[in-house]
Image (cartoon, grey):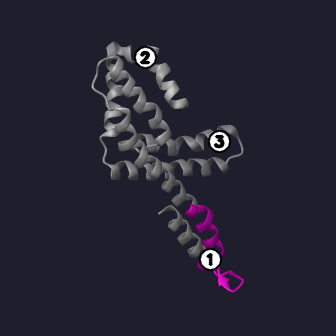
Amino acid sequence: IGAFFVAVLVVYGGIPKLFGGDLGTAMVNVASARTDLSFLESFVRGILCNILVCIAIWMSFASKSVSGKLLTSFWPVMIFVLCGFEHSIANMFFIPAGTLTGAIYDIPAPSIIEFLLNNLLPVVIGNIIGTNIFNICIVIGLPITMLGGVQIVGFNVIDIAFIAISALLLFFF
């Protein structure tokens, strides 16, 4: 709701008219490009995006200062933006902004239904899976690697991790 509200403020604030209307055209082109992706492309880009977002978060945990947290978070986020990966929350601003701009300035733009079905659905699923893949690797995989052959109640730690990962995968799929 917040991202959509900001998109409304930006569009009704006349921002798309800047640069002789070229900014408005660019906003519509971004929205169209994101909704023109196939389900699989959006899904995979969502996975890759949230892996980088998780890297940014985990890297920020390594720093004690605010400036260090900002600097370590910047690089992974910059990479996902430059690579064109899909983040559901960012798209909740960009695509409605492009759609509203198209409606107000009479430029062909994707509909809200196209946004929901062609982008938001696969990207949200991809973002969730990307987050879980990364965090399973870090939260479960790293301790397993460090503990190696430790036995817990007759089970090897690797066996327990395999069971936990299998249960998570069954839950999500």
Q: What residue type is labelled 2?
A: Ile
Could you say where residue 30 lies in the image, as x and y percent from the top left?
35, 32
Whether pointer 2 and pointer 3 mark residues with C-beta atoms closer than 8 Å, the reply is no
Helix, strand or loop at disc 1? helix
Residue at 52% of width from left, 31% of height from top?
3
User: Is residue 59 magenta-colored?
Assistant: no
For marks 3 and 1, give the one nearer the viewer: 1
Q: Nearer the N terminus, badge 2 or badge 1?
A: 2
Could you say where residue 29 lies in the image, as x and y percent from the top left?
31, 30
Could you say where residue 129 lies in the image, as x and y percent from the top left?
49, 56
Query: Is the residue 153 above or below the residue 41 in the image?
Result: below
Helix, strand or loop at disc 2? helix
Name the chief secondary structure element in magenta: helix
Residue 160: mark in rendering: 1
Give the residue number, with chain letter if any, for mark 2. 15
Could you say where residue 83 lies in the image, as x and y percent from the top left?
39, 44
- Distance Cα–Cα, label 3 vs label 1: 36 Å
Quarter of the image for residue 104 reads: top left
Q: Nearer the N terminus, badge 2 or badge 3?
A: 2
Total numbered badges shown on the rendered structure: 3
- Distance Cα–Cα, label 2 vs label 3: 33 Å
Give the residue number, with chain letter if any, for mark 3. 68
Question: Which residue is more in the foreground, 80 or 122?
Answer: 122
Helix, strand or loop at disc 3? helix
Query: Is the residue 152 above or below the residue 62 in the image?
Result: below
Residue at 57% of width from left, 59% of height from top?
135
Q: What residue type is labelled 3?
A: Gly
Question: Start and end of the magenta stretch?
Answer: 136-160
